[in-house]
Image (tube, helix red, strand yellow):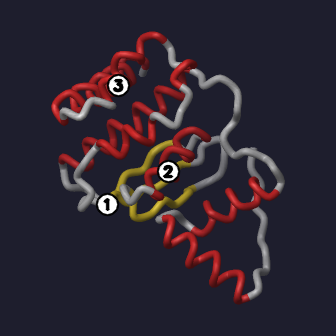
């Protein structure tokens, strides 16, 4: 469940928020939410063991990013789950995304991602994935996730396709 909260920000704070969000390639709303959660010592990404659905959401995100890059599309819309929001935020910080915008309210919240097509490598995406705890991965994901770390682009591409196939198998 989510609640809409309207805040009156002093001009100086608004300017700092906008500038910092632009530097991180995330929306000001996302930065404000993360900053509020951090200030309250509340982690926006749950610390519980990731579920199989979480990994499917990540696989869907990666598949849509891959397909968009292949089609030279600059925008995709995906479900905003805590883990995909965290991953997209990290990808924005790494320069892979130009913008992240949250759309709608929970439980059907989505995020619109503007892809940086000038960043053609997929290796930074795999470095982002390594920030997740691999010990908690379901066994069927280990090989694909290990292959995402491979320096060979062809092996990484096959791993992304395998994750997409896994996701489609659950739909």
* Direction from residue 6 to residue 54 in the image, left or right: left
Q: Position of residue 49 (x, y in %)?
A: 65, 23
- In the picture shown, does residue 21 fall above or below 91? below
| Residue furthest right as drawn | 40
Q: Which quarter of the rendered picture does the N terminus lie within?
A: top right
| Dot in front, 1 or 2 | 2
Check disc 3: other Cα within 10 Å, few if <14, some if 14-19, many if 20+.
many
**What SS does tag 2 mark?**
helix
**SS of the residue at dot 1?**
loop
Counting residues from the start of the chain, the first of labels 1 and 3 encountered is 1
Give the residue drawn at x 78%, y 74%: 7
Marks 2 and 3 sit apart, C-alpha to C-alpha, by 20 Å
Q: Is residue 63 above or below residue 141?
A: below
Residue at mark 1 to residue at mark 2: CA–CA distance: 14 Å
Write down the residue under mark 2.
90
Left or right: 45 in relation to 92: right
Q: Residue, x 79% and y 80% (percent of image)?
A: 8
Indicate which disc residue 163 carries. 3
User: Sequence-wise, which precedes: disc 2 or disc 3?
Assistant: 2
């Amino acid at each position: 469940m989510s609640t809409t909260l309207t805040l009156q920000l002093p001009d100086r704070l608004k300017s700092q928020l906008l500038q910092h969000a632009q530097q991180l390639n995330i929306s000001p709303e996302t930065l404000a939410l993360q900053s509020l959660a951090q200030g309250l010592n509340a982690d926006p990404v749950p610390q519980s063991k990731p579920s199989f659905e979480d990994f499917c959401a990540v696989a869907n995100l990666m598949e849509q990013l891959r397909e968009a890059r292949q089609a030279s599309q600059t925008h995709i819309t995906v479900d905003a789950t805590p883990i995909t929001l965290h991953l997209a935020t990290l990808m924005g910080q790494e320069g892979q995304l130009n913008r992240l915008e949250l759309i709608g309210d929970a439980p059907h919240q989505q995020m619109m991602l503007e892809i940086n097509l000038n960043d053609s490598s997929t290796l930074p995406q795999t470095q982002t994935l390594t920030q997740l705890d691999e010990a908690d991965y379901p066994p069927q994901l280990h090989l694909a996730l290990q292959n995402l770390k491979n320096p060979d682009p062809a092996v990484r591409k096959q791993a992304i396709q395998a994750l997409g196939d896994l996701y489609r198998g659950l739909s």
